[in-house]
Amino acid sequence: MIAQRITKRILLSFFTLLFSASITFFLVNNIPGNVIDVLAAQIMESYGVSYDEAKQMAYTYYFGYESNKSLLERYIDYITNIFRGNLGTSIMYRVPVNSIVVHALPWTLFVLSLSLLTGFAIGTLLGLLMAWRRKTFLDPLVTAYASFTDATPDFVTAMLLFMFLAARLGWFPLKGAYDESLTPGFYPAFIISVLYHAALPILSYVIEHIGFWALIVKGSAASVLEEDFVKAAEARGLHERRILTAYVGRVALIPVIAMLAIQLGYMLGGSTIVETVFTYPGIGYFFSQASSTLDFGLMQGLFFIIILGIILANLAVDIIYPLIDPRARRESAR
Amino acid sequence: MQGELGHEGVLVNLYYSFFRPIIKYRRAAIGFVILSGFVLMATVGPEVVPLNLKTDFSQRYKPPSFQHPLGTDYGGRDIFQQIVHGSRDVLTIAALAAMYAITIAVTIGILSGLLGGIVDAILTGLTDIFLTIPSFPVMMAIAAVFEVRDPFSFAAILAIWMWAGLARSIRAEVLSLKQKEFIEAARILGLGTSHIVFREILPNIMPYIVINFITMIRSAITASVGIMFLGIVPFKITHWGVMLYMAMFQYGAVYVPEGIYYALAPLFCIVLLEYGAISLAHGLDEIFNPRLKTYE
Amino acid sequence: MKMTKLETGLVVALIILVLIFGAAFVSLSMRISELSASLTNISGKIDTLSSEVKGIPEAIKGITHPTKPTKLAEFVIAGGWPMPPGYHGNPFGPGGVGSCYRFIHEPLYYYIPGNASFLPALAVSVEDKGKVLVVHLRKNVTWHDGKPFTSKDVKTTWALVGALWSNKAWRYIDKIETPDDYTVNFYLTRTVSPLLKITILTQPIVAADHLFGKWTDKALNVVSLMKQIWDLQAAGKEVPKDLMDKYNNLKTPLLKEVQAFKPGKPTGTGAFMLDKVTTSVLVLKKFDNHWATNKIMVGTVRILRWTSNEVVWAYHMARKIDASHAAATPDVVKQLLNDPNLHFMLTSDLSQFAIAFNTRVAPFNDINFRKAIAYAIDRKKMREVGNYYAMDEVYAHGVLPSMQSQWLPNDVLAKLTKYEYNPSKAEAILKAAGYKKGSDGYWRTPDGKTINIEVTCPAGYSDWVLALDELVRQLNSFGIKAESRPIPNPVFWSRAHAGKLGMHLNWFCSWAGTGDPYTGYYDLYYGDRSKDTGVPANKTFDTPWGKAVPSQLVDQLLIEKDPAKRKEIVWKLAYITNEYLWEIPWAEKRIQIYYLDGVRVTGWPLPTDPVWTLCPGGIERAYYVMIISGMLKPAASS
């Protein structure tokens, strides 16, 4: 029964993936506009040539940009390549998208998994405490914090951290993923340098997300507190902390874990803004480059990675959810 | 009967059921006052406060004063006027977008969770597609063909990207609610689907919807900026999101101490709006959600 | 205790997290070991290279390093380059070699517009023999890989820049010959003009013959076809399809072959060679066998990635970079200059911002309407909010305000209309042309329709967006109903070139690359600006100096040698451009340059030094000339 359900979900996800990827392909390939002029303006500025010559150079750089194959042929190429695990070729960089992903994804995953975990842990703790001690100062304080961080766009948070902690105070590095004077390798100095460079990007995410998780967990826990089994536990005179962790937390976290998984899925796309401000070589950084130069090849490949991440995360939730939530399991068994 | 009750009766009723609890619970009161202030600003504000966008370079970056309650911007223009005149568009479009998104999400989420089967499969597939298709190429495509002038279409363009996540969560919530005793009971009692939806399911997912509504309003404000820079809608310098963006990126407000009011004013408004909304929502939740009352 | 469902779930979630985390770490470590492997590769290459260098007789070495300076400075700037793994090190590859271009590749001469002088680099002298330009190359110049620099390298470079970049100088170059290793003869189709001389001598020599020589012949074939096509086009004849096909069939495979060459590091003759390239930094090390090595006091050039102006400001505040040209508002500049060691100066960017009209559509096809707008708009206010440090303009003649005195004497200027802010004059012009103001305060066209225009600009230039907003505000207060709409840059330019925009913000008469009015007028009457505005370039116009056709004037301007006659051509073009207002310039763009003195380097030239005029179109070129001429040296404190 479960096996059948899982197979169904996987098949559905597969079709969603194919469908979304196809739509994205056609959208990306129909993005209007001419990137030659954008490039020519850049070349004119950095090569000291006239606009006309800059345009000729831009044509050379972007050579192959207009494929002589029809859209349908390119689509078939794209899909067959994806089945072979090939995400296509970047037009601007002339390298396989796979190699860019191999370069960039580890950094993105490293920073985002650390920040997501930290933010989630702190947020959950605050949320549970808020739900439990409703009448303390904690609730209005965290709510105020959450409204502040949620209402502050991520570019503001990242710029403020960059400006004050990195530029003015000089406590953290301004750019990059590690100190380029070090040779990459496994030795303490390099690992410390990697962590040191990741600190501010991680901090920007964590600051933005603590409030979010706290509010979500609080909402979820507040409704669990009303459940009969919690009341029963209270009536039995169980210790508060035990009720909170063993009873409330357990159940309250079920829907939140689903959200965590989905957030993990979105992670594959990286964050364009944070990575750009800190010049961090993750996926989001390459993505901003791809969209500013309309690098269709790179865009297609990166979009596919993002779509894949979201669909896998949703699939994982769909499969795991019934296992942990008895109510949903009964439903699916029907 | 109705005639006998009259307006007074309704008002008294409204007082006891809505205003008194709000006054009693401080948080709800704070939220209510804040939101009323914003509504007032958007409705009456532009009529009362004049808007003068004429630049006067010698007056730039003046600190708050009686003449300029929030100081002046880079062009020497009054920030307060811009905030007030921006509020109508900002709030209308954000609220409209959030409302569209909530409506779509609730409809699709409940239908798909309640009906199951083939409907569920189709709707979930649709949701997943909207969840995964990246907005950038779509927006670029829209930018090439559409030019939007009215707030309704503007809000619709924003809403397309906001509903899918919520629809998915609502579906999951409905699936789990379906198993609860009260819904089973309603079903056994033969109460109609509309009763189950409106009386049993909606009230239970309401807190969830409300908190999403609030975050959607916020994200609609910031997302509007992107849409303006794509040329889909006309550019408005009084839009709070644009003010914040320009302050941060064009004028380097974090670099210039005098310029901080230009960045803070729109940011403060967005934060206050969100805080007011969350406070009111939580306050109302505590008042009207009977299950929580035991903890007072 | 039996594990509950939730605990199972939590464990599963945890496992997923650990897996993702683990995957990140494993792939990261794989990247790291890969990176360190490639780095050892590079250092291996450097070792072989230096051993080759060792082969040079000690005697010569003794001469080139008489007193080797004990300490060399580090010089840090910001720039861009194709990010690894896309970095290829091939100047003809997509994105080129990046901001290290000027540090790695040198031209025959540097041309300094400020004092109209040539600074010798790879060449030592030039003979102008009528239709032949004879260039004598510097001896004892070596490429970074130790191979000697010869005339063949010049020929290969010209073959490739002609074939791949369609370098326009080839229109007037017949052939290039190399009678010996240190002489290059450029045979021209007509006598040498100053403009052509600048173009030929300042082309960086990017293609070493020992690396690119195998493509020289193919490239020259492409060039000869290209020249045929150009000649036909110039004569106004149609290019036969088989010629076009032949050209494309030759050029396409050549381009593919050349771009497939990915050495990883560019090889040049410049004073610096690429040491390391990551996503966030490019590191260049001094090349000890450079011809000017004993003058050079900078040992390392570090280029940080220029992600955005705000980030570069922060780099300045943290004293992480020595120089940049990140545009900023006066208030930001004031903050930056709190650093006593940071200096600030302005130099023309040789381009102008303008309000452009698509003169094909109403109401912009009406010269009176355009004139009214020129008087109705306070351009100074646009400049203040949009680009404070730009230079105000009251004419629209296409000669940059900073160059006006060189080209347009006062008696010529007196013949041109001065468009000073004067709304009442604008009203009078509109009324005289039959426009009427309605009761709502908005203007109507002579046939009674309310004017309602949408003004556009590229959304990517946020300073333009602000100027646009100011423009639209002024239009509305003047009584012309208008809305502002920024459009994404790629969409904007393709719509502009297709003639689909109405009133918009655009460039105007950019002199980039040459500092000569020809470049600007070519763009306006032949290039993309003619597509954007639809100027009738082949129409005959009256000027105070007789009738003239703009496109013919532009052609004459290119080939005319006599400076006095060139000026007369410019007067006519300036008159037509100013009186017909295809575009209204609102300011001349100026580069804001910041340089940090006394932290890592010192010895910056005075702002009045002509070397700064090398900045437009490649500011790195100015820094490089300052380094190789020995101006920049280590600061005492560093």
Image (cartoon, coloured by chain):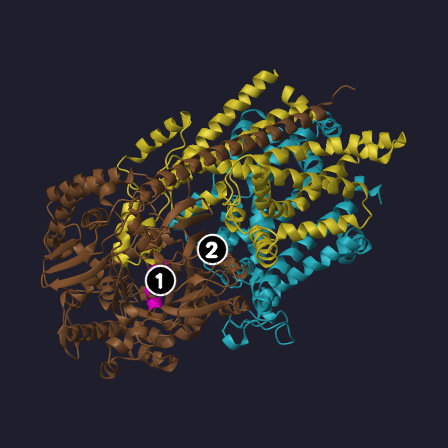
Give the overall secondary structure of the magenta segment.
helix
Q: Quadrant of the N terminus of chain C?
A: top right
Label 1: which secondary element: helix
- The tag on residue A230 is none
Report whether residue A23 is seen: no
Mark closer to the observer (1, 2): 1
Count residues near mark 1 (Cα–Cα under 10 Å), then give few for <14, some for 14-19, many for 20+: many
Q: How many marks?
A: 2
| Three-letter code for the amino acid on which mark 1 is drawn | Ala
Chain B rendered in what hue? cyan
C-alpha span from label 1 to label 2: 22 Å
Residue C494 image offset from top left, x and y in percent: 31, 52
Q: Which residues are magenta?
A: C611-623
Between C637 and C380, the residue placed more toward the observer is C637
Chain drawn brown, letter? C
Relative side of C225 to C605, left or right: left
Q: Measuring 40% from the left and 35% from the top, which residue is drawn there? A: C41
Rendered image quadrant of residue A257: top right
Chain drawn yellow, letter? A
Task: Tell me if residue C621 is in the magenta stretch.
Answer: yes
